Image: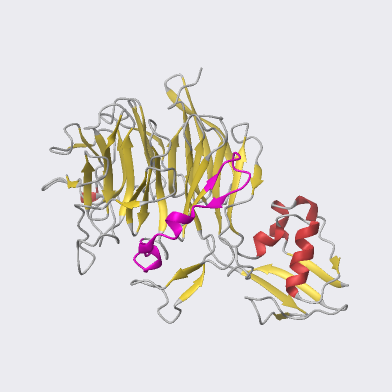
């Protein structure tokens, strides 16, 4: 099971995410992981990805500390020990 | 019983602010989505439902509704472009190396109720150019294919104005004919359907666009906002990028009624009297190149003779050191009441058709939309 930590900024829109203990998800890729997250927290995928399924420009996903390579197709592989962080980029004012 | 004009909605860069009219003044009546940009908000007069389009910097565009005037909110599925739809490269593409890219929801420009006798119908105008329709009170949204597939868009004649891609910012439902709609698209122009959206006709005859090498194209104009006189639906007005234009034949032809030698030329917003098709209000700015208040002084210009003459209404408005601009959805009218909000967070209102103005507040965030309800 991959372990997922989501930025606390998402708690405002998905109160059930708090408290922010890591979420355990069975997924072979980032795309599968976001699909599984959306099943558990309906609507969450639309916050992370646009209509075409690509990662939104100011959202970052890290797998084991490294930013994913495929922001369009989310094909980066996960394994049972993967630690995934979903962060927001610093932008705006 | 509250009437239209007794509620004021400010959609700002930092949230939605609601005001109610009490005792001859406006009182704060709630703040929603504090910190989140609200691109547009309105109350559907048929149902009383308050709608707000949010433009999160990180999380995309969202759509929410409230059945209790903002005390509680429910997020509903925002319009979604069908899989495989693309934005074609256009003559003013933001990325000439990419011939096309996926069409995704980039901005909720406006939300409009359908006709009075179809209370479940709503429309949403979006960037990159999709008109979305709901027939279930906003639960689900479908792209209007005939407009999206209009030959002019497929030929790359729509392009961005102000934002990266073409956007539908004006939606007018003819109150006498629910199958007749007009939409304003920047940049493309005004389009009309008389068959409920099954087919669309370009309505740009007479316009001139000085920012194009050929100033009279059929498509490619920039109507910043389009409005109709509800008592005389053949009368339409538009504050265009290149001046103020009026139609007296249902948008078939347009005539330039900009003020010669006065401030009423460039701007974004326009409001038309509900009863008198010859009366309209605009919020002048210097020009395309320098978007600030004309002469460092704020005014609203009004015509009561169909645009032959304009009067700059200044009483109560700052007349020096003023750089405010009024965006396209930030001037509204309800009977004798008018109000507008500015890019520097000032909001003014008038009870006498703009003769005298009072300040509602000078420390709001940038105002994207101001609508009476």
Q: Is residue B138 above or below residue B304?
A: below
Would residue B302 be found to the left or right of residue B143 on screen? left
- Which x, y percent locates residue A40? 81, 57
Residue B325 visible, this orientation: no
Numbered label tally: 0
Would residue B247 be found to the left or right of residue B161 on screen? left
Q: Which residues are magenta?
A: B133-161
Residue drawn where x is 30% and y is 56% of the image: B222
Residue drawn where x is 57% and y is 51% of the image: B35
Residue drawn where x is 79% and y is 64% of the image: A36
- Which x, y percent locates residue B42? 50, 38
- Which x, y percent locates residue B190? 32, 51
- In front of the other: A19 or B297: A19
Would residue B341 be found to the left or right of residue B255 on screen? right
Q: Is residue A61 on the magenta stretch? A: no
- In front of the other: A75 or B36: A75
Residue A53 visible, this orientation: yes
- In front of the other: B244 or B137: B137
Q: Is residue B354 above or below residue B146?
A: above
Q: Is residue B79 above or below residue B357?
A: below
Given the current orientation, which residue lies at the most extreme top position? B1
Q: Is residue B160 on the magenta stretch? A: yes
């Amino acid at each position: 099971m991959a372990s997922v930590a989501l930025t606390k900024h998402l708690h405002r829109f998905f109160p059930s995410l708090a408290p922010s203990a890591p979420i355990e998800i069975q997924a072979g890729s980032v795309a599968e992981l976001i699909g599984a997250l959306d099943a558990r927290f309906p609507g969450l995928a639309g916050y992370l990805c646009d209509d075409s399924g690509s990662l939104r420009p100011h959202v970052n996903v890290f797998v084991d500390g490294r930013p994913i390579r495929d922001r369009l197709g989310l094909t980066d592989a996960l394994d049972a020990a993967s630690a995934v962080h979903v962060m927001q980029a610093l932008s705006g004012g | 019983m509250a009437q239209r004009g007794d509620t004021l909605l400010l959609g700002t860069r930092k949230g939605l602010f609601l005001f109610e009219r009490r005792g001859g003044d406006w009182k704060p009546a709630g703040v929603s989505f504090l910190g989140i940009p609200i691109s547009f908000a309105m109350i559907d007069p048929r149902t009383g439902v308050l709608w707000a389009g949010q433009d999160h910097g990180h999380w995309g565009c969202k759509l929410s509704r409230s059945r209790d005037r903002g005390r509680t909110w429910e997020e509903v599925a925002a319009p979604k472009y069908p899989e495989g739809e693309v934005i074609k490269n256009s003559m003013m593409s933001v990325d000439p190396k990419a011939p096309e890219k996926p069409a995704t929801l980039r901005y909720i420009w406006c939300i409009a109720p359908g006709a009075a006798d179809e209370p479940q119908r709503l429309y949403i105008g979006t960037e990159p150019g999709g008109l979305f329709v709901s027939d279930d009170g906003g639960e689900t949204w479908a792209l209007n294919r005939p407009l999206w597939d209009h030959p002019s868009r497929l030929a790359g004649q729509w392009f961005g104005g102000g934002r990266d891609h073409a956007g539908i910012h004006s939606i007018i439902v003819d109150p006498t004919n629910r199958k007749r709609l007009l939409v304003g698209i920047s940049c493309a122009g005004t389009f009309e359907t008389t068959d409920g959206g099954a087919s669309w006709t370009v309505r740009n005859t007479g316009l001139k666009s000085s920012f194009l090498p050929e100033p009279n194209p059929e498509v490619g104009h920039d109507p910043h906002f389009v409005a109709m006189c509800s008592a005389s639906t053949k009368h339409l007005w538009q504050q265009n990028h290149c001046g103020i234009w009026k139609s007296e034949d249902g948008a078939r032809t347009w005539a330039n009624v900009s003020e010669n030698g006065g401030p009423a030329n460039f701007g974004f917003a326009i409001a038309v009297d509900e009863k008198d098709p010859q009366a309209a209000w605009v919020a002048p700015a210097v020009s395309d190149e320098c978007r600030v208040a004309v002469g460092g002084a704020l005014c609203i210009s009004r015509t009561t003779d169909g645009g032959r003459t304009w009067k700059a209404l200044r009483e109560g408005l700052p007349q020096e050191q003023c750089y405010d601009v009024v965006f396209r959805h930030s001037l509204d009218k309800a009977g004798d009441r008018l109000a507008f909000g500015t890019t520097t967070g000032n909001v003014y209102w008038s009870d006498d058709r703009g003769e005298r103005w009072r300040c509602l507040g000078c420390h709001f965030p940038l105002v994207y939309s101001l609508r009476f309800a």
